[in-house]
Image: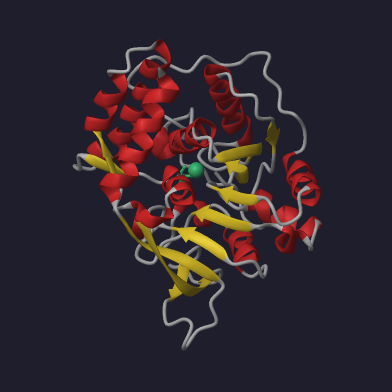
Amino acid sequence: MNTIDLWLDTDPGFDDWMAWALLEADPAFRLHGVSVVAGNAQLPRTLANALAIKRLHGFTTPVWAGCERPLAQPAVTAQDVLGAAGMATTGPRLAEWAGGQADGNGVRALIDAVRAAPGRITLLAVGPLTNVATAFALAPELPSLLKSIVIMGGSTTGGNATAAAEFNIHADPEAAARVFDSGIEVAMFGLNVCRQVPVSGVHVDRLRRVGSAKAEVFAGYLDGYVDIARQRGRAAQSLYDPTPVVWLAAPQLFDLQPARVDVELAGRFTRGMTVCDLRAPALARANARVAMQADGDAVLEWAMQRLEAALA
Ligand code: RIB
Ligand code: CA
């Protein structure tokens, strides 16, 4: 099996947690490090969540603290939706890791890891792109040293933070613009494809049936994640951050198209929008591959099987 060498940049968040757990669960992945960024909550909170997740699962991957605020705007979080903890639960709460400490500066660690393995590291970013853009600014050669970059972010249709902007881009549009303009092709998993992967109470019950204390904690937070949809009159929530993880292991479950993606920075109503020109390659110079289709049932089955084993 060809192992996929990865670096995860994340703003835990429950869907971030699920993505991380899948990366640790499947032998196809070798996770070199986890850098944490502000997003779902302020950095102290997303970092505390990451350390609590690491302790619950007994992960050994180093966790590094990244950027606290966006490049050029006041910080925004999703705590109005997710609560102060940045992720809600209907079950037992994650125990804080009181003695847990980050392993150092996340941006520097990302740069060092990529420089140490030129052409080998896939960077998976599932939060605002502040850490990534800062790393690219400090080490301009970094995009050329990455094997690839994959993001959960953006949308070819409407937004979730605003009518036009998806949250990860909305939280730091300047950073996202720098990443799409960095010269490396971005594999973009936006709201449009994540909406084809609906996670619901059926999946919560399936993980609760695993029966372990760890499964009870995890399933409670998955239930809290599905509650986001229930509170809006829907039974299922789009599966965001784990979706690109499944693509990395099972690309046959997806269809991606070349596109020119530009990030709107000036629009009064559209700032943070990913403007996706799907006329590539004929009429637009592609800088991305944008996920357009997913076999939602198969994606969820891939994830559930690995979570059932990981939570046993
Ligand atoms: O819009 C969804 C994204 O915003 C996900 O990455 C979620 O964790 C939040 O960061
Ligand atoms: Ca996230």
Question: Left or right: 14 with respect to 44?
Answer: left
Q: Nearer the viewer, residue 245 or 135?
A: 245
| Residue 238 spot, x, y in % from top left | 32, 46
Locate the N terminus by quadrant. Answer: top right
Q: Is residue 305 left or right of residue 45?
A: left
Count the marks: how many?
0
Instruction: Name which residue lies at 59% across and 61% down.
Output: 176
Q: On the image, which quarter does residue 218 sit in?
A: top left
Q: Is residue 89 visible?
A: no
Tell me: 119 left or right of 95: right
Query: Residue 162 location in percent, x, y?
Result: 40, 57
245 relative to 55, above or below: below
Q: Which residue extends farthest front? A: 1
Left or right of 296, for residue 264: right
Residue 124: x and y, percent?
Answer: 57, 49
Tell me: residue 103, above or below residue 112. above
Question: What residue is drawn where x is 79% and y is 63%?
Answer: 140
Q: Is residue 11 visible?
A: yes
Q: Is residue 271 above or below residue 241?
A: below
Quarter of the image with the C terminus in it: top left
Residue at x 52% of width, y 37% of height: 23
**x then y, percent, for residue 143:** 71, 62
Colouring scheme, one of rainbow, by chain, secondary structure, one colour: secondary structure
Q: Nearer the viewer, residue 224 or 215?
A: 215
